[in-house]
Image: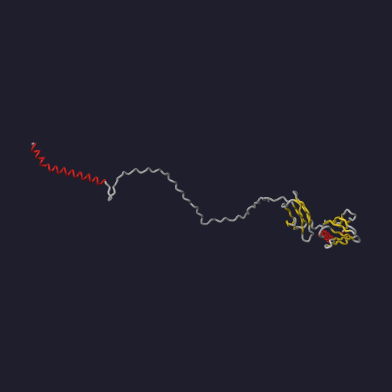
């Protein structure tokens, strides 16, 4: 083809190529715009982001816990056999005796009449036979009595050693005394009246001292209001006594003890 013909051909198809090029450019612009629009998020549609799935974290190896063993409850038999009683009695085992802790006795009282009442300083302690370690040291007044018998009285001294008293109610005894003033026809003298199983004795530094057996005693009387004790020997002399106390209690006690003993000694 000649140059002129080729040029003519270009000119003939020029409009077509121009239009084609424009169309291709529009398509490219429209595609770019569409791509831009798709990348801009809108309120109507959330952007979809595709991320690669991360690898799952490694799972630590766990040691499996042992399963609990099943508890098997023993099953009771429907009917248990009843054992027959053993006819042989069980041996009796004696328990060892444990001694009781107590105080060492300091006072012991016995009597030939069991169950006599024991008093210490007018305080009842118990009945015979009796012993105690719960008593204060020092002087005390001991009284022992039993119904139907003469009472017993004695001064005792409690110390570190055991004090033992044996009361004989069935035996006749007498140990009474009192300080007195012997009234003479003219004047008086002081002395002491004492009584035992042998009789009444007057002890003094004067020559009026005497002893009268109970068999020779004719009169033995106390006048409490007159504060006088009178003693008369059978077919003999009369003696009148008083004392320096405010009342006649001491004379009355002496008289009572002598008369009780005389009654027991009489047939």
Q: Quadrant of residue 207?
A: bottom right
Question: Looking at the image, which residue sits at the far right?
Answer: 235
Residue nearest the viewer, comparing 197 with 6: 6
- Relative horizontal placement of residue 84, taking residue 267 as reference (left or right): left
Residue 80: percent from the left, percent from the top? 53, 56
- Relative horizontal placement of residue 209, taking residue 100 as reference (left or right): right
- Relative horizontal placement of residue 58, taking residue 230 as reference (left or right): left
Residue 204: percent from the left, percent from the top? 87, 54
Q: Quadrant of residue 174?
A: bottom right
Where 74 sits versus 10, above or below? below
Count of numbered labels shown in the rendering: 0
Residue nearest the viewer, comparing 265 with 18: 18
Residue 99: percent from the left, percent from the top? 68, 50
Quadrant showing the N terminus:
top left
Residue 122: percent from the left, percent from the top? 75, 57
Picture colour scheme: secondary structure
Quadrant showing the C terminus:
bottom right
């Amino acid at each position: 083809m000649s140059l002129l013909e080729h040029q003519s051909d270009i000119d003939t198809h020029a409009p077509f190529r121009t239009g084609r090029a424009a169309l291709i450019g529009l398509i490219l612009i429209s595609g770019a715009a569409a791509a831009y629009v798709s990348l801009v998020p809108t309120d109507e549609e959330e952007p979809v982001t595709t991320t690669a799935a991360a690898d799952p974290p490694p799972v630590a190896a766990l040691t499996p816990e042992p399963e609990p063993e099943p508890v098997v409850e023993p099953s009771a038999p429907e009917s248990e056999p009843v054992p027959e009683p053993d006819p042989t009695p069980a041996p009796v085992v004696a328990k060892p005796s444990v001694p009781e802790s107590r105080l060492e006795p300091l006072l012991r009282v016995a009597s030939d009449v069991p169950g006599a009442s024991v008093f210490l300083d007018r305080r009842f302690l118990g009945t015979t036979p009796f012993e105690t370690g719960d008593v204060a040291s020092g002087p005390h007044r001991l009284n022992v009595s039993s119904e139907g018998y003469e009472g017993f009285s004695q001064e005792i001294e409690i110390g570190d050693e055991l004090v033992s008293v044996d009361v004989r109610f069935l035996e006749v005894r007498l140990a009474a005394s009192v300080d007195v003033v012997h009234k003479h026809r003219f004047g008086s003298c002081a002395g002491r009246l004492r009584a035992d199983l042998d009789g009444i004795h007057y002890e003094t530094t004067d020559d009026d001292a005497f002893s009268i057996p109970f068999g020779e005693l004719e009169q033995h009387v106390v006048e409490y209001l007159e504060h006088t004790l009178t003693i008369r020997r059978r077919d003999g002399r009369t003696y009148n006594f008083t004392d320096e106390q405010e009342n006649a209690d001491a004379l009355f006690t002496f008289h009572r003890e002598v008369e009780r003993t005389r009654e027991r000694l009489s047939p």
